[in-house]
Image (tube, rainbow, N blue to C red):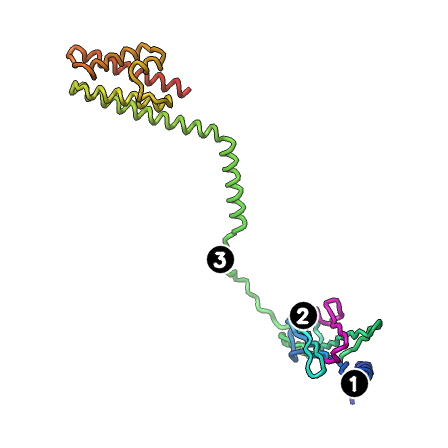
Amino acid sequence: MGSGFRSWWVGVLVAWLPAAAAAQSAPWLVPEGRFLKKSVMVGELVDYELRYEHAPDVEVVFPDSSAQFAPFEYVGKTYYPTRTRQGRSLDRTVYHLRTFRLDSVQSLALPVAVLQELDTLSVPTLPSRVRLRRTASPLLAQTEQLPALRQNLALVPIEPAFNYPYWLAGGAIGLLLLTGSATLFRRRIAQRYQAYKMRKNHVYFLAQFARHVERFDLSRSATNVERAVTLWKSYLAGLENSALTSFTTREIVAYFENDSDVRKALSATDKVIYGNLQTEDAEEVDRAFQRLRGFAERRYASVRQ
């Protein structure tokens, strides 16, 4: 026999003798450890199963993650509950390991701790071996040269990925800026919007009022005079935020502090609406329209300021 085989056999005997002695002192105290596959690659997960069959009244503790798994690295484990049949209990745990060592054959033997009153007995297992499966071709002993490498400098196109975190962060910052700006300039923005609405309504009023005046010039109808006055009241009611449309002529004059243009204009239009329109009254109605439009423009300028 070779010296290597003799050394291995001596190691087996040394590891087995304590287990045999423990087996004589208590029944079924010989744990069994084995790899679930014969070969493994570097970095690949390999499962190591540890089984221990013992008497039901024996307290057993299996190794945890702090045990010595060299030359392997501990990754995790799968524990199976104790199963008792026909007066024998079986504990079983599968350890998930991996190795980065380059030894052709690697072995592992995990002990099992047996609690006996105030003492603890460590029962070893026989070493279990796994062969390292290499993926690279071994170098030729004659040449001892590295294999020739193939050079490839061609660029490989990569599809750009959408950067969600940056876009979400940018959107959140933009939303905060908009919220802060709206809070800071809310009053100014509201004032500008109100000024825009007021200017738009004023332009619309002037256009509609001019249309009623033009129709009166063509028809000399009291209906057009009444429509013009009604439009004037509605516009000023919205501008002043008041119920001016329901006021009488006297109440309107009093509301505007007896303004001469309002008093004279409404007096002239009332004669046309509620009386008979005479030809010589047409010029007075035209002057009344001018007074009403001028007063509306003055009130618009006053409210806008």
Asked whether residue 68 is drawn in magenta, I would say yes
Mark number, residue 9: 1
Residue 130's spot in the image, x, y percent? 69, 78
Instruction: State the image quarter where residue 112 is shown.
Output: bottom right
Taking depth in this image into account, of 266 and 254 the one nearest to the observer is 254
- Residue at the farthest right position: 118
Residue 227's spot in the image, x, y percent? 23, 22
Q: Is residue 148 above or below residue 230?
A: below
> Horizontal placement of 11 versus 300: left or right?
right
Q: Residues within 10 Å of mark 2 (few under 14, many from 20)?
A: some
What residue sits 42% from the left and 28% below the top? Answer: 192
Say which of marks 1 and 2 sits in front. 2
Q: Amino acid at mark 3?
A: Glu
According to the picture, the residue beneath numbered tag 2 turns out to be 77
Taking depth in this image into account, of 145 and 93 the one nearest to the observer is 93
Residues drawn in magenta: 53-77
Q: Residues within 10 Å of mark 1 (few under 14, many from 20)?
A: few
What residue sits 78% from the left and 87% below the top? Answer: 2
According to the picture, the residue beneath numbered tag 3 turns out to be 159
Distance, label 1 to label 2, CA atoms, is 30 Å
Q: Look at the image and tell me whether residue 14 can be seen.
A: no
